[in-house]
Image (spheres, grey):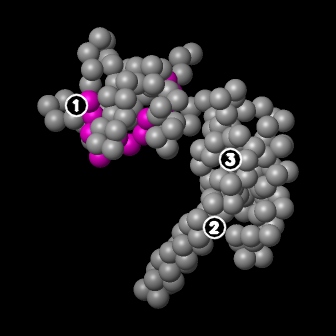
């Protein structure tokens, strides 16, 4: 029983540490990105290949190139070193575009994709249906709901039912 509790405690502190690093880093990252003309999409801090990685996802009206990622990475090095969000623990800084199929996380993600085809996955079906996934054109998103157009009809889905929304990619 003590072992189970210590595992639970380790998971709690790990989650707390990860959230703490991200919360410390976001204001500095946001400030640097605004000065460079990029938009912050997300920040992740997690273990990859045995090392900790702080990954900053950026967007730009013109898309994101490898040169953009390098520019942002170089601009973030000094401010993040000065901040030391990991309290001296080593990490790798990665800068990336969100990717084609990355779920929308911010209101700006939704706004940028109005009029585009999206995939919406639900936690549970809407009352009276058995469907947990929809493809349609993104019309709008508010604090209460997302609206998509499916086969010429507008479908309003409460945000509490939405597990994820991401671009629909046709192969």
**Residue 138 appears at what percent x and percent y?**
40, 24
**Residue 19 appears at what percent x and percent y?**
56, 66
**Is 32 located above or below residue 81 in the figure?**
above
Q: Which residue is mark 3?
A: 34
Q: Which residue is mark 2?
A: 24
Between disc 1 and disc 2, whose residue precedes? 2
- Gap in Å between the C-alphas at discs 2 and 3? 17 Å
- Gap in Å between the C-alphas at discs 1 and 2? 42 Å
Q: Which residues are magenta?
A: 156-168
Is 107 left, or right, of 63 in this rendering?
A: left
Which numbered disc, 3 or 1, marks the residue closer to the eye?
A: 3
**Residue 91 appears at what percent x and percent y?**
77, 64
| Residues at circles 1 and 2 in contact by the CB criterion of under 8 Å | no
| Residues at circles 2 and 3 in contact by the CB criterion of under 8 Å | no
Q: Which residue is mark 1?
A: 130
**Kind of element beneath mark 2:** helix
Label 2: how many Cα within 10 Å (few below 14, some 14–19, many 20+)? some
Label 1: how many Cα within 10 Å (few below 14, some 14–19, many 20+)? few
Which numbered disc, 2 or 3, marks the residue closer to the eye?
A: 3
Residue 53 seen from this side: yes
Residue 46 seen from this side: no
Between disc 2 and disc 3, whose residue precedes? 2
């Amino acid at each position: 029983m003590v072992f189970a509790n210590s595992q639970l405690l380790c998971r709690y502190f790990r989650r707390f540490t990860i959230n703490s690093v991200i919360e410390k880093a976001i204001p500095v990252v946001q400030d640097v990105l605004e000065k460079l003309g990029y938009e912050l999409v997300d920040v992740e801090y997690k273990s990859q290949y045995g090392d900790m990685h702080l990954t900053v996802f950026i967007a730009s009206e013109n898309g994101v190139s490898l040169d953009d990622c390098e520019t942002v990475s170089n601009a973030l090095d000094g401010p993040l070193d000065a901040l030391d969000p990991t309290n001296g623990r080593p990490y790798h800084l990665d800068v990336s575009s969100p990717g084609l199929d990355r779920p929308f996380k911010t209101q700006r993600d939704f706004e940028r994709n109005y009029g585009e085809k999206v995939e919406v996955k639900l936690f549970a079906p809407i009352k009276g249906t058995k469907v947990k996934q929809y493809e349609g054109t993104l019309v709008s998103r508010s604090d209460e709901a997302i609206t998509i157009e499916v086969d010429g009809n507008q479908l309003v889905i409460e945000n509490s039912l939405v597990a994820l929304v991401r671009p629909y990619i046709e192969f």
